[in-house]
Amino acid sequence: MITPNASPDELSSPFFLKNEQTCLEWEKFAKDNNGEIQGSYNAWSYKLFLKIDNPTPWRIVISRATYTSGNLLLSSKYQNRHDQIVIKTKVDSNAEFIIKKPSFRDFFSGKRMSRLHVNNTYKVLGQSEGEIFNKISVLLSKQFKSKQVFLVELKKKLLSITINNANKEFELIKSLVSSNLE
């Protein structure tokens, strides 16, 4: 169940109402897909925890937060927004890899990284071939092309996918959960 944790002053805020609507959409999505959802929201943020078993358990954290400097005299362009979905599941694969945008630190790490064929902006560390790697590349191709993917990591049979600015990607979640990532 998703519950508001807003102050009485926030209840009529358009930001509160927008976050409430998003939470209701995720609640409906969870119900339609035999999932369980918990979380809270207010005018500034929401954090939702979704669990779907199909048959492998998928754990999904959907979060949004708006941070400000606290100074009302500064323009809203100095506000920061955090929108993120983190998707995790266990897979039956011995492959291990990381897909991410390269950082300055990677240049000096000495690790050999190949380019991702869907979007050359992303680098791959580890096994960039195999069935599970190809399935993930296809399933996330739209998000790779729009540069929303922050990190994809498969390590010790735990797949973790972090996507930015994608808090209403219901079809993506549905396709990941229904795919057979083995």
Image (spheres, rainbow, N blue to C red):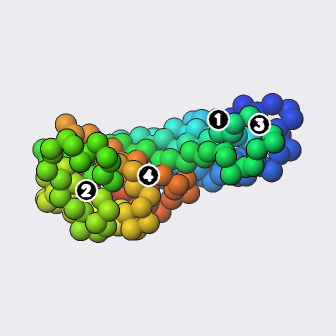
Disc with the residue nearer the chain's start (4 vs 1): 1
Disc with the residue nearer the chain's start (1 vs 3): 1
Element on which disc 3 rests: loop
Q: Is residue 75 left or right of residue 79?
A: right
Q: Amino acid at mark 3?
A: Asn
Residue shown at 18%/53% (left/top)?
A: 113
Q: Amino acid at mark 2?
A: Lys
Vertical order, 132 against 110 (above or below): below
Disc with the residue nearer the chain's start (3 vs 4): 3
Disc with the residue nearer the chain's start (3 vs 2): 3
* Residue 32 visible in the shown view: no
* Residue 13, horizontal then vertical, whole percent: 83, 45
* Residue 156, horizontal then vertical, whole percent: 19, 37
Which of the two marks, 1 or 2, is nearer to us in this view? 2
Q: What's the distance in space between the residues labelled 3 and 2, CA to CA?
A: 39 Å
Disc with the residue nearer the chain's start (2 vs 4): 2
Q: What's the distance in space between the residues labelled 1 and 3, CA to CA?
A: 26 Å
Q: Amino acid at mark 4?
A: Ile
Q: What's the distance in space between the residues labelled 4 and 1, CA to CA?
A: 20 Å
Q: Is residue 117 left or right of residue 39?
A: left
